[in-house]
Image: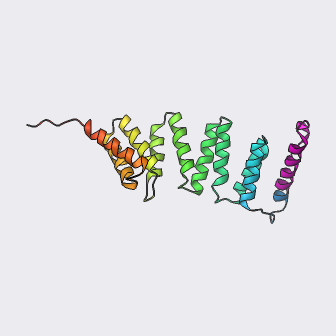
Amino acid sequence: MRAIDLTEEADLPLELEDRRRKLEWLLLSIEADPNFSPAADALLEAGLRAHEQGLVREARKALELLSRLAPQDPRAPYVLGELSLLSSSPDEAAGYFRRCLAREPAHRAARFRLVLLADEEGDREAAKLHLGIAGAGPDGSVDALLLLGIICAEEGDRRGARRAWSRAAALDPLGQAGVAALRRLRELDDHAPRRRRR
């Protein structure tokens, strides 16, 4: 097993180099001894701290290890997705967010990231799909339904907009997004084409 090469960054401040060595030791210990498994929280914290210190490679290594050690935990793929966005790798980020959702389908932050990535790609159908999933169920996201209604209305799909906004208003009639959905429904009705009487 190859240790992380510290010589390429010999001008690091001593404290930072010491932290890097401790992180390297932790990662090597975990890899060398399968029975050595620190709490997932500690490994996640190590990855986040490494990233804060600019140790991107070590952060990714810690998070990938967490992903392997805790295959049902959605946090590592989510954070790796966020790191991929920071490094301008949207395709890689989308893959991590999908992995996160495979582990926890109700993970709203990952779902909304996929909505934003789909929208940036101009894939409104994918954005609508993810918004619909986020808004489904008894504790669906009112914000997702509000956005879904807006997209439907922009596309001229009045029926889809009405469905999304009605559901948002029913889920949270007194909340800010629910009230916004009710207002949009009224505007939709005000601008509805009138049928001629015969």
The count of marks equals 0
Q: Residue 172 placed where, x, y %?
A: 40, 54
Establish if 8 lies above or below 170: above
Q: Is residue 65 visible?
A: no
Q: Residue 72 placed where, x, y %?
A: 64, 60
Q: Is residue 184 left or right of residue 192?
A: right
| Rendered image coloring scheme | rainbow
Q: Residue 50 placed where, x, y %?
A: 78, 46
Rendered residue at 58%/54% (across/down): 102
Establish if 33 lies above or below 6: below
The residue range painted magenta reads: 1-28
| Residue at the bottom extreme of this rendering | 35
Q: Is residue 189 left or right of residue 51?
A: left
Rendered residue at 75%/44% (across/down): 51
185 or 127: nearer the viewer: 185
Rendered residue at 79%/46% (across/down): 58
The quadrant in which the C terminus is found is top left
Q: Is 109 part of what is drawn in magenta? A: no
The secondary structure that most of the magenta stretch takes on is helix
Q: Is 3 part of what is drawn in magenta? A: yes
